[in-house]
Amino acid sequence: MIYAVPKLGQADHEVLALIADQKERLRLFTQNSPNRWMGSLRRSTFARAIVGSNSIEGYHATVGDAIAVVQHEQTMEASDETVAALQGYRDAMTYIMQAASDPYFEFSQQFLKSLQFMMIRHDMTKNPGQWRPGAIFIVEQATGKTVYDGPEAEQINALIEELIAFLKADNGTPVAVRAAMAHLNLTMIHPFKDGNGRMARALQTFVLAREGVLHPVFSSIEEWLGNHTPQYYRILAETGKGRWNPGRDALPWVRFCLTAHHQQAATLIRRNDEYARLYELVVAAVEKAGTHERCTISVFDAALGWPITNPRYRADAEVGEYMATRDLKSLCEAGLFEPIGEKRGRFYRRTAVLEKIRNAVRIKRPLENPYDLVKTPTRYRLPSAEGRR
């Protein structure tokens, strides 16, 4: 038996309706958008999801380094171990994007094993692509206390088969709830020696992406989870009570995920509004500086705070190395870029001019608890930030 879909209340259905409205708004400006900066939003959102999911596991990186990984470029600050983790997650998520639109796709155990292999293949001591061979215990580093005891290894195959059957079934469960339950069950089964959390979060994204309403990048709540790691650990601990416990009510977990969906969608909507205004100001700055309009996307990304390299500029501006070097020199002379480093290690960052433009378009829009916005009252609140970190 795996964790069952809980009975939803009226408030939950009303929150799901709020999320559906947000998704429709996101769909309108992300699907086939003519805006030139939409690629930057997609790329940075993908990078933030990678950073968020890996930070939960202790692999910390800047969004700039994650963008470099997404672009198959050299990172500037991340350790080799962190880069390997980011690359593995990038590959798994890229495969998810492809599989999400495959009309012949079928959930299977091998699909899960293959995704986990992509994530963990840099460390063969962790048996990537195979179920864990024995018991697993999650220990809190600060105290040495065991905080979770997973099911016996002999149970894994049957439990995963049950999870696969759930994912294949069309029982009318709202997709956000189905995705949350897929996440919860894979986390609690803990079928692998390593990478279980990343796998569960990626699986949730995949279930959402299969719905087809939004691009997988914009379906993910991994950035939000990375920003709420203590609460994430707390709700998992409260749901499982320290062991494989599928008879427990999963409603608090589902409400946690629905809150994450609402607030992550609100964040993306806010960013879209900011980026639209920022792009206008960047276009004006490029024109004022007398540089070519092909510089605009790179100047836009730099204004956001991302480092710009010669290879990235060439890709975005669609020019060769000579023209890229010339353009970048012009942007420095115009006071928009500042060069850092020498030769192959050189990159360009924004000057105070672009930073001022970026700060001018920031929108202060607090994230709301969706359960405070619905007509049906409920006492649901996020778990406290206390707990595992």
Image: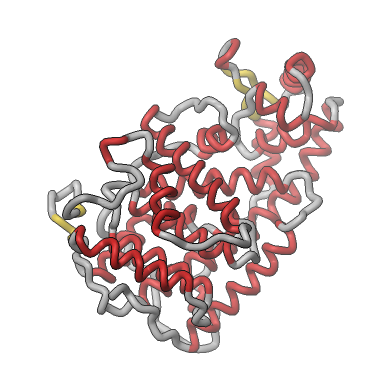
Residue 330 appears in which quarter of the rendering?
A: top right
Whether residue 268 appears in this view of the structure is: no
Q: Nearer the viewer, residue 382 or 242?
A: 242
Q: Nearer the viewer, residue 334 or 34?
A: 34
Location of residue 343 in the rendering, given as x and y in whole percent from the top left corner = 60, 10
Q: Nearer the viewer, residue 236 or 93?
A: 93
Residue at 33% across / 60% down in the picture? Answer: 187
Q: Quadrant of the N terminus?
A: bottom left
Residue at 73% across / 58% down in the picture? Answer: 31
Q: Is residue 170 left or right of 127 when viewed as pictured?
A: right
Whether residue 319 appears in this view of the structure is: yes
Location of residue 387 in the rendering, given as x and y in whole percent from the top left corner = 25, 59
Location of residue 28 in the rendering, given as x and y in whole percent from the top left corner = 74, 63
| Placement of 221 over or under 350, stated as above or below | below
Q: Is residue 212 left or right of 195 when viewed as pictured?
A: right
| Placement of 126 over or under 351, stated as above or below | below
Residue 245 appears in which quarter of the rendering?
A: bottom left
Residue at 33% across / 57% down in the picture? Answer: 230
Q: Nearer the viewer, residue 231 or 75?
A: 75
Q: Is residue 253 left or right of 51 when viewed as pictured?
A: left
Figure label count: 0
| Placement of 126 over or under 137, stated as above or below | above
Residue at 45% across / 27% down in the picture? Answer: 77
Indicate how the structure is coloured in the image: secondary structure
Location of residue 73 in the rendering, given as x and y in whole percent from the top left corner = 56, 28
